[in-house]
Amino acid sequence: HMLQVHQIPCLSDNYGYLIHDDDSGMTATIDTPEVAPINEALKQKGWRLTHILNTHHHFDHAGGNLELKEQWDCTIIGSGPDADRIPGIDTKVDDGDEFLFGDHSVKVFDVSGHTIGHIAFHFADSDILFSGDALFSLGCGRLFEGTPAQMWQSLSKLIKLPDSTIVYCAHEYTQANAAFALSVEPENEALQARSKEIDELRASGKPTVPSLLGLEKATNPFLRPTSPDLQRNLGLQGADLTEVFAETRRRKDNF
């Protein structure tokens, strides 16, 4: 049985997600950006919230934890190393840990960089990844707490997942990310085509999320420090990949 994933627009540009396992009746929200839309979606679906899976401590990801926990008596799973910043945490997990959600195995990746202790959740049997603010559609999270080396190490873990992995990220940033990506790798034909599609989706009010990891590997500059075109455009031919990544991130910060 595949997990059901229900995507919920929250705040100005966040996405919340409900995941539901029919067999066990378990339902989790990935992060808690906004309580009312999450509760409304639960009501529409007729699901009972059993879990909160937190990717990181920022308010637009964990701000609704305590209110939802009080209402639903659900179990909050989050980063052990960052437990003191995850409100109401019950179960602490760390890099490489696996746990069961119903019969579905969930693998935890530490993807520190945006924050220290940021984690991502990979449901291998459903081919889905909840990447929070570590990996975005055509982007990656701003480095508020970590170093470029840490973030590149984090993204390198996700690159190893199958191309067929569906990436559910936490924000609708794709159109702005595409403009930046084209500025550093304008020769990339897959990126040119994707940028057009994104403009069409946004013009008709449709989300650009989720995306496929294979498409991210082909078009997302933060996963492409090995690209000769990207290296040349940054003036870093043959440079260390961490250095290429760091310069790409620096340019995005100033874009």
Image: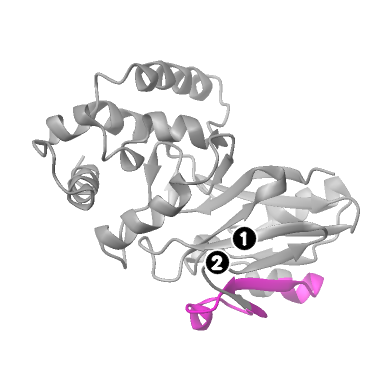
Amino acid type at mark 1: Lys
Identify the residue at horizontal 58%, vertical 27% (top origin): 206
Residue 37 relative to residue 140: left or right:
right
Residue where numbered disc 2 is placed: 96
In this view, 40 is above or below 204: below
Identify the residue at horizontal 40%, vertical 51% (top origin): 155
Is residue 208 among the parts visible in the rendering? yes
In this view, 71 is above or below 130: below
* Image quarter in which the C terminus is found: top left
In this view, 163 is above or below 111: above
| Identity of the residue furthest to the bottom in this view | 84
Task: Locate residue 189, reporting x and y percent.
Answer: 34, 16
Which label number is shown at residue 107?
1
Task: Locate residue 212, reporting x and y percent.
Answer: 54, 33
Do the residues under discs 2 and 1 have CB atoms within 8 angstroms? yes
Which label number is shown at residue 162?
none
Coloring basis for residues = one colour
Q: Earlier in the sequence, mark 2 or mark 1?
A: 2
Residue 39 relative to residue 53: left or right:
right
Magenta extent? 69-91
Q: Residues within 10 Å of mark 2 (few under 14, many from 20)?
A: few
